[in-house]
Amino acid sequence: MTPPGSPSALPVPVYPPKPRPGDRIAVISPSSGLPGLLPLPYELGVERLEKEFGLVPVEYPATRTMGSTPAGVPTTSTRPSRTRRSAP
């Protein structure tokens, strides 16, 4: 165990204050636009944030768009296509 104050000690994490009723919170979909395909679970979650926690959800513009970028513009994959090599 590393003693506190030594150069290799990990920094103590700093957490933001917990949200309180009336606070605005961002609602995003970081990996996909699934709320556009499956709206029910998404809507239930937003409703719960409002009714049970008193928060004000603010939906990110691209939350319901599949394949969107942070600017909200749909994009296509830039990965090179994989081709099978023929056997020698």
Image (cartoon, rainbow, N blue to C red):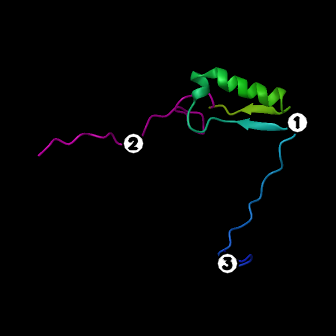
User: Main SS of the magenta segment?
Assistant: loop
Residue 21's disc is 1
Secondary-structure class at tag 2 = loop
Secondary-structure class at tag 1 = loop
Q: Nearer the viewer, residue 2 or 26?
A: 2
Picture quarter containing residue 26? top right
Label 2: few (<14), some or many (≥20) within 10 Å?
few
Residue 50 picture location, percent across and down = 81, 28
Q: Is residue 67 magenta?
A: yes
* Residue at the image point whose x is 83% and y is 26% from the top: 51
Amino acid type for the residue under numbered disc 2: Arg
| Labels 2 and 3: the sequence-earlier one | 3
Amino acid type for the residue under numbered disc 3: Pro
| Labels 1 and 2: the sequence-earlier one | 1
Q: Which residue is mark 2?
A: 79
Q: Which residue is mark 3?
A: 7
